[in-house]
Image: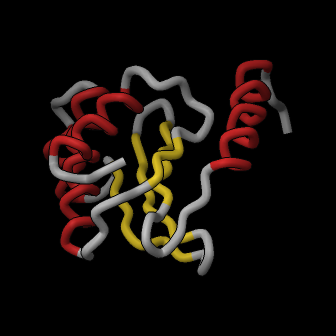
């Protein structure tokens, strides 16, 4: 597998973060992944190894509304949707796992949108 220096650094940061950030049934881990085109979010209970809630810009309803948006604005919409789904499943608090990405741009906007919808970090 070919890796470049930036992905190696991100993987190192990711491993360091995951040593400290653990999702429980009371406070699951909300992790983000961003590709060049799409943004994905999962809320995971690490003790049982199950994904409780997920959202991404690939979903049919989000994809149609996100086609005309910038990636940052689409991430805001994904953050709102994942917060609504969490609150519908009685999940009020999560631990945020930025997955080795710097906390700015899509990552920060997604987190801010989830907080604005009532999710507590």
Q: Vertically, is 105 above or below 116? A: above
Q: Quadrant of residue 116?
A: top left
The front one of 33 and 103 is: 103
Q: Could you tell me which residue is drawn at 52 percent across and 39 percent down? A: 98
Colour scheme of the picture? secondary structure
Report x, y in % for residue 114.
25, 46
Position of 37 with respect to 9 (left or right) is left
The residue furthest right is 1
Counting labels gives: 0
Q: Vertically, is 34 above or below 40? A: above
Position of 79 with respect to 49 (left or right) is left
Report x, y in % for residue 101.
56, 30
The front one of 92 and 52 is: 92
Q: Could you tell me which residue is drawn at 47 percent across and 25 percent down? A: 103
Report x, y in % for residue 87.
21, 66
Q: Could you tell me which residue is drawn at 42 percent across and 73 percent down? A: 52
Report x, y in % for residue 119.
26, 53
Q: Vertically, is 116 above or below 108? A: below
């Amino acid at each position: 597998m070919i890796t470049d220096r930036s992905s190696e650094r991100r993987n190192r940061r990711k491993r360091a973060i995951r040593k400290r950030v653990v999702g429980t049934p009371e406070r699951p881990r909300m992790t983000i992944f961003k590709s060049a085109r799409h943004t994905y979010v999962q809320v995971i209970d690490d003790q049982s190894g199950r994904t409780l809630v997920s959202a991404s810009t690939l979903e049919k309803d989000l994809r149609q509304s996100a086609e005309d948006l910038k990636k940052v604005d689409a991430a805001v919409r994904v953050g709102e949707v994942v917060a609504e789904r969490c609150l519908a499943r009685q999940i009020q608090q999560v631990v945020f796992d930025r997955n080795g990405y710097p906390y700015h741009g899509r990552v920060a906007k997604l987190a801010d949108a989830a907080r604005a919808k009532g999710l507590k970090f």
